[in-house]
């Protein structure tokens, strides 16, 4: 059975990645309120169902894509329940077909492994190489559920804080699309 801890409002006692440590340091500095759970490694959206139940929210689906030449990168945030088709995103953005970026690029650009892609990875994108793309349906949710940069700790945050404070803090300008 997939393990999900009780909800807590404290940071992990041990940080497993530099990005995870950056996330909680930023929360401390900015006084951000959050809830989180520790889990078994969560890789699939099915794993996120128990996380959602424990935190009483909906985890977003965060995908890292690129063009064929691997020169343009996109961090896409959509709802977990929505099927994702690269052709729909390409059409919404008015660009050629996209594909999932290689794991090595996910790690080197956003500091995460497969299953841990998160909007917080934008803190590591100092070159502004990644275009953030947000599905409009995310804006209707009060809570934003996501990874803290690992596959074993998940957060519940205010969607308004993520959109209005965190994203501008990173210097990225999101494109809003309907997927």
Image (spheres, rainbow, N blue to C red):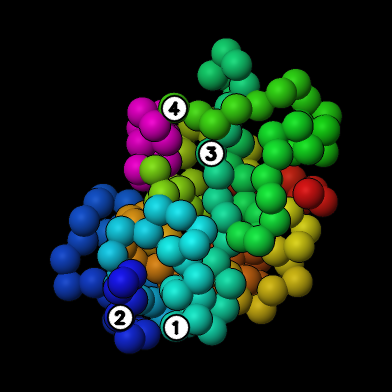
- In the rendering, at what x and y percent does residue 121 appear? 44, 48
Furthest toward the left, the residue is 14
- Seen in the picture, residue 95 relative to 59 is either above or below; the reply is above
| Image disc number at residue 54 | 1
Return the residue at label 2.
5
Q: Nearer the viewer, residue 154 or 46?
A: 46
Label 3, secondary structure: give it: strand
The residue carrying pointer 4 sits among few (fewer than 14), some (14 to 19) or many (20 or more) residues within 10 Å by Cα, namely few
Residue at 54% in and 19% down: 70
Q: Is 48 left, or right, of 2 in this rendering? A: right
| Image disc number at residue 102 | 4
Return the residue at label 3.
64
Residue at 44% in and 74% down: 51
Label 4, secondary structure: give it: loop
The residue carrying pointer 1 sits among few (fewer than 14), some (14 to 19) or many (20 or more) residues within 10 Å by Cα, namely some
The answer to whether residue 104 shows anywhere in this view is: yes
Q: CA distance from mark 2 to mark 1?
A: 8 Å
């Amino acid at each position: 059975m997939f393990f999900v801890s009780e909800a807590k409002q404290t940071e992990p006692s041990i940080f497993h990645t530099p990005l995870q440590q950056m996330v909680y340091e930023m929360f401390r500095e900015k006084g951000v309120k959050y809830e989180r759970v520790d889990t078994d490694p969560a890789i699939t959206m099915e794993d996120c169902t128990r996380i959602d139940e424990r935190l009483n929210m909906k985890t977003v689906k965060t995908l890292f894509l690129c063009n064929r030449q691997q020169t343009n990168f996109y961090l896409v945030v959509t709802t977990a329940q929505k099927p994702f088709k690269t052709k729909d995103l390409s059409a919404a953005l008015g660009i050629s077909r996209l594909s999932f970026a290689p794991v090595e690029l996910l790690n080197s650009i956003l500091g995460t492994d497969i299953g841990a892609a998160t909007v917080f990875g934008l803190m590591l994108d100092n070159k502004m190489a990644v275009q953030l793309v947000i599905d409009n349906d995310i804006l209707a949710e009060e809570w934003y559920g996501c990874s803290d940069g690992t596959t074993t700790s998940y957060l519940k945050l205010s969607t308004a804080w993520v959109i209005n404070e965190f994203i501008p803090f990173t210097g990225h300008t999101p494109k809003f699309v309907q997927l």
